[in-house]
Amino acid sequence: MTHPAPTELLDLARTVALTAGALAHRRRAEGVEIAASKSSPEDIVTAADREVELLIRGLLADARPGDGFYGEESDATSGTSGLTWVVDPIDGTVNYLYGIPFYAVSIAVVQGDPDPASWNALAGAVVNPALGEVFTAAEGSGAWLGDHRLHVNHDVPLSLALAGTGFGYEATRRVWQASVVGGLIGQVRDIRRIGSAALDLCSVACGRLDLYFERGLNPWDYAAGALIAREAGARVGALQADAEGRDLLIAAAPDLYDQFEPVLAALFDRFPVAAENSRK
């Protein structure tokens, strides 16, 4: 089946993400309403999460009714075109709740099943409406912040690398993650915990972070950000030959990735995660 060019799909992703970001920003100014908790009391969903995803879903369905949809806050649906839109309506919901200006609308379109191990990401947009930043990438066309071409930082030794990571919602999982961070912090320049996987990956793409790693992510957390990081020159994956996913995601310039991977593997051996804590 013939699909539109990735750049054409990106135009739609960017337009929809900007519209959705404007709604999220407006709802934040009006006051945030917690609609429910999910995996734990700390894992919240706001009324705005649901409203923004409903808007995105409707706009994409109007523009491309044959495509599938895979979002955080609603049921996944398959399509007939072979393309699926992978959407996080508000990545960084806790930041959003507290008025911290690091949350984002993340929209990617992938070819194939909505499985990161097998899909091919074609285009992605990550919009931070609080700061007015728009990160985009289309397969083979580079990564961009607005009209500025992005490139990851190269030739950074691990000891001078600024690393980003994220923590899960369950307290026991965060304790384990803190153990890993404690083992790493003396081997890097410093560590940042921003609270949005999509923005962390975009930060690697634009050089605000040198590397990023996290376990327990969902596909909508990183589908767009991983493509943006790749198109900026990052290697995105996991340990050894594993693909990025829930078990682990690492993003860094290839030379730094090669330095970091064995260090992280050794930390995981030193601080094994219990099976019941292996999911976010």
Image: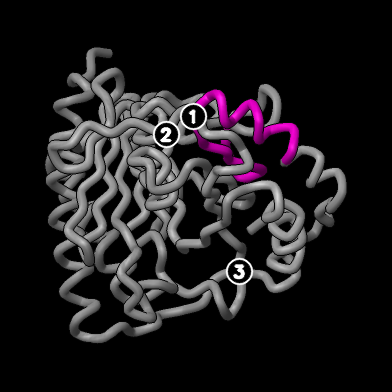
Q: Which residue is mark 3?
A: 169
Foreground: disc 3 or disc 2 = 2
Q: Amino acid at mark 1?
A: Ala
> Left of 18 or right of it: where is 115?
right
> SS of the residue at dot 2?
loop
Q: Is residue 160 magenta-colored?
A: no
Left or right of 9 on screen, residue 139: right
Q: Would you name the residue on which mark 1 appears?
A: 253
Residue 95, above or below 275: below
| Disc 2 crowd, CA 10 A, few/some/many (<14, 14-19, 20+) | many
Please tell me how crowded label 1 is: few (under 14), some (14-19), or many (20+) other residues with Cα within 10 Å: many
Q: Earlier in the sequence, mark 2 or mark 1?
A: 2
Task: Identify the residue shown where x is 34% and y is 63%.
Answer: 103
Q: CA distance from mark 3 to mark 2?
A: 30 Å
Q: Are marks 2 and 1 in contact (CB under 8 Å)?
A: yes
Q: What residue appears at the point 69 percent right and 47 percent down from the top-left corner? A: 187
Residue 119, position in %: x, y?
A: 46, 26
User: Where does the magenta region start and end?
Assistant: 244-263
Check disc 2 and report the residue beneath it. 153
Secondary structure under the numbered disc 1 in the rendered image: loop
Residue 235 screen position, x and y as percent: 50, 27
